[in-house]
Image (cartoon, grey):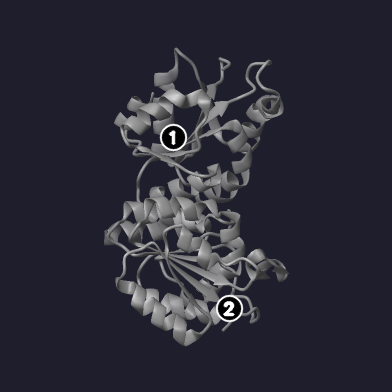
Amino acid sequence: MIRKEAIKIASDAVANSPIISANGYISRDLFETNDKETNFYMIGSMGLSSSIALGVALKNPRKRVYVFDGDGNILMNLGSLTTIGKLKPKNLIHLVFDNQSHESTGGQPSNTKNIDIYKIAKSCNYKSFKTTSKVGLKKILSKTKNIGGPVMILIKINKGGMPGKRIIHSPPTIKKRFSQKLNKQR
Amino acid sequence: MFDLLLRKGVENFIGVPDSTMKHFISQGLKKKKILITTREEEAIGIAAGMSLSKQCSLVFMQNAGFANSISTITSLIQLYEFPIIFLIGWRGYLKNDAPEHYKIGRIQPDLIKLIGLDSKTVTESNWKECCQWAINKINHSIPCALILRREFHD
């Protein structure tokens, strides 16, 4: 399974819940496969998608808030796992698309070939799941719809495929439409 | 200062502690309004998320943390136009502060100006006006910074 396939499966399953997506190809793939007002594309500030999602989750306890994170991204902000684990937001679902590399910058290796994010998340009070297949991912996504978080879904993916299109919305537009939708649905 | 900002509608206080503002943080902890994070950038991310829910947030940090946060301020806060108040402790303001604070203390005012972050330095006599100034900025969706000078040694 490559990143774009995994992102398509996950964003279809998430439906209209808010998604905060990591910078680089993850946001671009999400934009190309399933552009929605409920997507917040974080195009800079690498590492912070889980923190932004934590802020959204704490203030919107009735909504399931999803993070579409990457291995390079979460490694830059591992402290975030401890803050999330301390606060235990029941409505935070943290997906990590792990291709063991920085694919957006040319495929350089990341540390997750040797280090298991699943185990780190577990010791940070997450309910952790792991999959390498499309069927497995669909199963976990439907199972986790009804359990209290924080939930971590580690999705081991392969490198490859064409990167998604660049996001055409301006950052203030991304913020405005996300925020309007979030506060309307509240 | 904490009580005034809270009364004026700041709902979330997130950051990494600095001894320059220990009384501010103690007051916030007493009122159960403080969230301590592992790094300053993480605090800024959480504040941005809360701001998406139309909540007014303040991020506190020492100037060492401000230096850590420059990319996050430019590529998240300013890029998306998130209205957030920064409260930054100015270590190295006094010439004889600890050596690790000299350089950042010296270049801090220029750095803040260079990235285009509107700021005011808080004193004994102007703190109320400074708080009101910051609230007005936020109401116009402009991020801003309040600077607290370190005027004591411990």
Q: Quadrant of residue A146?
A: bottom left
Q: Residue at x 40, y 60 (%)?
A: A178
Amino acid on which the number 1 mark rests in the picture:
Lys
Q: Quadrant of residue A151?
A: bottom left
Residue located farthest toward the top when viewing the structure as drawn: B125
How far separated are the C-alphas under marks 1 and 2?
A: 44 Å
Q: Residue at x 51, y 67 (%)?
A: A118
- Name the subunit of mark 2: A
Q: Residue at x 64, y 80 (%)?
A: A162
Q: Quadrant of residue B12?
A: top left
Q: Is residue B106 left or right of residue B81?
A: right
Q: Is residue B116 left or right of residue B36?
A: right
- Name the subunit of mark 1: B
Classify the position of the C terminus of chain A by image quarter.
Answer: bottom left
Above or below: residue A121 compared with residue A5: above
Q: Is residue A73 visible?
A: yes
Q: Is residue A55 left or right of residue B119?
A: left
In the rendered image, residue B40, in percent from the top left (x then y), is placed at 54, 42
Classify the position of the N terminus of chain A by image quarter.
Answer: bottom right
Q: Which mark is residue B137?
A: 1
Depth order, front residue of A44/A140:
A140
Q: Which mark is residue A157?
A: 2
Q: Residue at x 31, y 62 (%)?
A: A63
Amino acid on which the number 2 mark rests in the picture:
Ile
Q: Is residue A168 visible?
A: no
Q: Are marks 1 and 2 on the same chain?
A: no
